[in-house]
Amino acid sequence: MVGPIRRLSLAPLLLQGCDDLGEPGEGAAVDGGTATWGVGRLLRRALVSGVIALVCAGCVVLIAWLPSVHHESLQREGARVEGTVLSIDDVNSKGDRASNPTMDVRYAVRGETFVETYYVPVDRAVAEGVKIEVVHDPDDPDDSAVADAPYDFPAWNLWLGIPLFLAFAGFGFGSLVGTVRWSIRLGPARTGWRTGRSRSVVEKPNDITITFDDGATTTLTLARPVSLAIPVSHQYGPVLIAGSGARTTVLFLSGPVLAAAWEHLTEDG
């Protein structure tokens, strides 16, 4: 008996091309229908990963692009008013090398006083009590910036944007690989499955040899070396095969573990 095996994580599902279908229920048979369902599930997971990648990309755009566009729009269309520098916080003197000095500026719009904190522009010298021009949204005076100052990308936006970009790259690449891999295999899986037995090829760790019930043999190359992607205990025993060539799928019944494969040699026994 094969004991319960760990459900594989998302990376093996999309990149290594294999999936642990889980232990079947008592008395349940693992057949071609189960295998076809597994291929469909892998395709759905790849598509979900693509949606996650798009969401991450959208968040990156919101963080990196929209604030800059808003700043440029404010500089062009905003109302200008004179403000006074109240204080300067030189954070670099406190050992924070990742931040620029900031300043508190007071300005008044229609009799209402506002105090906002801005990054000190790198192209000008400021000091406490100095007058400085501020540009603000006429409909929302609290939305303001230093006039004619370039957009200063906040450090927290950068730290948030980097993980989102990495997530976009990871999920996007995984979705691309997984969608292509399983979409071309779903059709052959629905057509039917052949039964046989598998054994590994010692000199080629990513290859397995399949002997079908009619005596014919074929060699399959898996997406990753068998020793890494498939538990050793599942490499020998009954299998189901669907498709041919680059659209081959193999189901190790002892797992059950489903894997993408390439059939590159077929000969009659």
Image: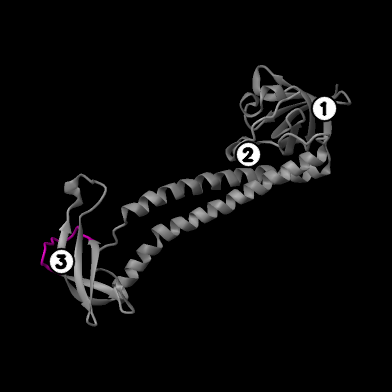
Which residue occupies the foreground of this view, 210 or 62? Answer: 62
The number of callouts visible is: 3
Amino acid type of disc 1? Gly
Amino acid type of disc 2? Leu
Q: Residues within 10 Å of mark 2 (few under 14, many from 20)?
A: many
Q: Secondary structure at mark 2?
A: helix
- The residue at the far front in this view is 26
Q: Is residue 260 above or below residue 175?
A: above
Q: Per the image, is 123 magenta?
A: yes
Task: Answer whether labels 2 and 3 touch (C-beta < 8 Å).
Answer: no
Q: What is the x, y in percent for residue 79?
A: 27, 78
| Closer to the eye: label 1 or 2 | 2
Q: Would you identify the image quadrant in which residue 262 lies?
A: top right
Instruction: Identify the disc placed on residue 196.
Output: 1
Q: Is residue 168 above or below residue 239?
A: below
Left or right side of 142 for 15: right
> What's the distance in space between the residues labelled 3 and 1, CA to CA?
81 Å
> What's the distance in space between the residues labelled 2 and 3, CA to CA?
57 Å
Q: Would you identify the image quadrant in which residue 209 lies?
A: top right
Q: Residues within 10 Å of mark 1 (few under 14, many from 20)?
A: many
Residue span colored magenta: 119-131
Mark 3 lies on residue: 85
